[in-house]
Image: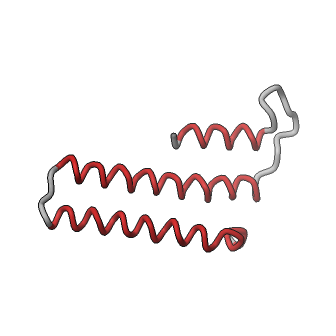
């Protein structure tokens, strides 16, 4: 994943935020907070993980995958794949 070096600091910042969110879940469980509070923390951290995955996956696609031989009205194969991945993580 040498291509991630360009965005290394941004990726590390995302990971650190996710780490903080996971620690918040742990604290909430230890403190026996309400279920809705814990669920909100979990869904927030899940969203953050999905966002990180989307960024790394998009960079991988852009760096390592080759456009389809033919372009159609929807654009190149690479752009179509990126669009599908983005819609999956929404």
Q: Residue at x 15, y 57 (%)?
A: 33
Q: Name the quadrant of the N terminus.
A: bottom right
Report whether 76 appears left or right of 89.
right
Q: Residue at x 72, y 37 (%)?
A: 80
Report whether 27 appears left or right of 50.
left
Farthest residue, direction left: 32
Q: Position of residue 47 (x, y in %)?
A: 44, 50
Farthest residue, direction top: 73
Report whether 28 appears left or right of 5.
left
Q: Residue at x 63, y 73 (%)?
A: 8
Considering depth in this image, is 37 or 75 the residue closer to the camera? 37
Please determine whether, in this image, residue 38 is positioned above or below residue 77. Answer: below
Q: Position of residue 58 (x, y in %)?
A: 66, 53
Q: Position of residue 34 (x, y in %)?
A: 15, 51
Which quarter of the picture shows residue 57?
bottom right
The total number of labels drawn is 0
Which quarter of the picture shows residue 9?
bottom right
Q: Position of residue 74 (x, y in %)?
A: 77, 29
């Amino acid at each position: 994943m040498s291509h991630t070096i360009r965005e290394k600091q941004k990726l590390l910042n995302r990971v650190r935020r996710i780490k903080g969110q996971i620690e918040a879940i742990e604290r909430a469980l230890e403190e026996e907070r309400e279920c809705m509070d814990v669920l909100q923390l979990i869904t927030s951290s899940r969203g953050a993980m999905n966002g990180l995955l989307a960024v790394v996956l998009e960079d991988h696609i852009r760096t390592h995958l080759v456009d389809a031989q033919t372009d159609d009205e929807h654009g190149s194969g690479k752009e179509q794949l990126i669009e599908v991945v983005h819609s999956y993580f929404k």
